[in-house]
Image: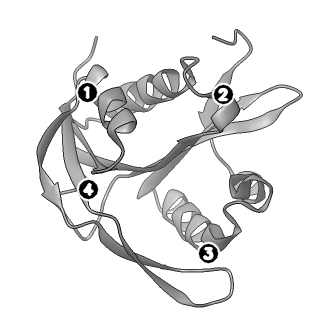
Amino acid sequence: MYTDLIVRHGNKADLPALEWGGEYTHFRRMFSDVYQQVEQDRAILWIAELPKIGLIGQLFVSLNSFRHDMADGVTRAYLFGFRVRPDFRNLGIGTCMMHVAEVDLVDRGFRQLTLNVGRENAAARSFYERLGYHVIGPDPGKWSYVNDLGERVIVHEPAWRMLKDLHRD
């Protein structure tokens, strides 16, 4: 684990770095939309960074969604857009980010955190299970976003819905 790792709330100046040097440019509008939700206290953006290296991880939490089974604005939040740069995986960074986000949610009064994990992503599912999440059912994994060219992109990624009951450690 890096002793100089910083996990902090993201800000507007972080948005370009979320594109990871062009790999996620197609999500530019989605990142902007999430940040608007942050400004409305409907979402949280977490950043993991290392001095001299920069952003190495990101995690979004929706506090209030039109889908109340995911985030109801009171007791249940929804985690999404969680990634750690490949060169920094399996070093405890993701675990640290999840812990920081979960403690913050408990402090805000939330009691549950939900997320979707791709059915084909056994490593991610195992990671979440190690952190205390359990599968509560399937999710069709159908969603869409508007890419950086203004085109609507339809995504179909069948997933497992996972849930963790949060509590103060």
Label 4 with label 1: CB-CB less than 8 Å = no
Rendered location of residue 115, percent (x, y): 29, 47
Disc 3: which residue? 29
Of 96 and 121, nearer the camera is 121
Disc 4: which residue? 159
Which label belongs to residue 54?
none
What amino acid type is highlighted by mark number 4? Ala
Q: Nearer the viewer, mark 1 or mark 3?
A: 1
- Characterize the local packing of mark 1: few (<14), some (14-19) or many (20 or more) Cα atoms within 10 angstroms: some
Q: Give the left or right position of residue 160, taking residue 57 as reference.
A: left
User: Which of pointers 4 and 1 lies earlier in the amino acid sequence?
Assistant: 1
Question: Does residue 145 lie above or below 149 as drawn?
Answer: above
Label 2 with label 4: CB-CB less than 8 Å = no
- Characterize the local packing of mark 2: few (<14), some (14-19) or many (20 or more) Cα atoms within 10 angstroms: some
Label 1 element class: helix
Question: Does residue 38 lie above or below 28 as drawn?
Answer: above
> In percent of the image, x 36 and y 28: which residue is there?
127
Image quadrant where one finds the N terminus: top right
What amino acid type is highlighted by mark number 2? Phe
Disc 1: which residue? 129
> In percent of the image, x 51 and y 21: which residue is there?
96
User: Which of pointers 1 and 2 lies earlier in the amino acid sequence?
Assistant: 2
Rendered location of residue 92, percent (x, y): 53, 17
Distance of label 3 from label 4 (alpha carbons) = 23 Å
What amino acid type is highlighted by mark number 1? Glu
Distance of label 4 from label 1 (alpha carbons) = 15 Å
> In percent of the image, x 29 and y 64: which residue is there?
65
User: Which of pointers 1 and 3 lies earlier in the amino acid sequence?
Assistant: 3
Distance of label 1 from label 3 (alpha carbons) = 31 Å
Image quadrant where one finds the C terminus: top left
